[in-house]
Amino acid sequence: MPSTNDANEGALGAYRVAIRGKPSLTLHQYNSQAMFRRNDTQDFMDAVFTDEDHAYIMREARRIDSSREEARRREEIVDFRIKTAEMQKTKALAKARKMRRTCRTTLPASLYHCVPNLLVNSKYPRKADKLAVLKEAFRWYETILEVVPVIVEELRDEEDGEMEE
């Protein structure tokens, strides 16, 4: 449960609002600005800082910005997202292959899992629609039955080839 009723309240909400207003603002810059506002740093700077102190602060800020810490952090995030997308794609392909294999060997009772565009029985309101879809599914299943022996032979050949290596 959120700590407040408003998603824009709190530290994370303030960050979200700031990023919405300034999309290129880095996390380091946001943290610096937030600390500046929270700690009343301006009053301290007005009372104590000299021109040399201001120059030093500006120089350090430029040094930190030029160190490309934020760019490296963003690159890591992008790399992670790319890696995650590749893993999801691989997983989806494996799932599709598995589904194809199981559809080639399943019984007609479970056709609706394998036949493209075949909905569950309750989705067809009329008996004629159900019958037409069922006939199409059986036609599809019969074509699969013709293909299965060829696929089995191919798989055996692949396994034999792997065993020889």
Image (cartoon, rainbow, N blue to C red):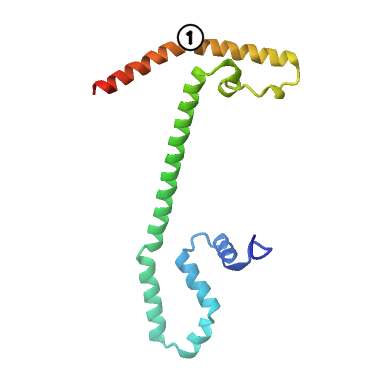
Q: Position of residue 136 (x, y in %)?
A: 61, 13
User: 116 or 152, which lies in front?
Assistant: 152
User: 73 or 146, which lies in front?
Assistant: 146
Answer with left or right where residue 36 lies relative to residue 86: right
Answer with left or right where residue 142 lies relative to residue 67: right
Q: Amino acid at mark 1?
A: Glu
For residue 21, what is the image quadrant? Answer: bottom right
Residue lying at 37% horizontally and 13% vertically, measured from the top left? 153
Query: For the view shown, which residue lies furthest in the left direction?
Result: 165
Residue lying at 60% horizontally and 68% vertically, measured from the top left? 10
Q: Residues within 10 Å of mark 1 (few under 14, many from 20)?
A: few
Q: Position of residue 62 (x, y in %)?
A: 38, 71
Answer with left or right where residue 107 lies relative to residue 75: right
Q: How many marks?
A: 1
For residue 120, what is the image quadrant? Answer: top right
What residue is shown with label 1?
146
Query: For the view shown, which residue lies furthest in the bottom direction?
Result: 47
Local secondary structure at mark 1: helix
User: Is the residue 11 above or below the residue 165 in the image?
Assistant: below
Residue lying at 40% horizontally and 78% vertically, measured from the top left? 57
Q: Quadrant of the C terminus?
A: top left
Q: Position of residue 104 (x, y in %)?
A: 49, 18
Q: Quadrant of the N terminus?
A: bottom right
User: Is the residue 45 above or below the residue 148 in the image?
Assistant: below
User: 118 or 52, which lies in front?
Assistant: 118
Residue lying at 63% horizontally and 66% vertically, measured from the top left? 9
User: Is the residue 22 above or below the residue 78 in the image?
Assistant: below
Q: Position of residue 4 (x, y in %)?
A: 66, 65
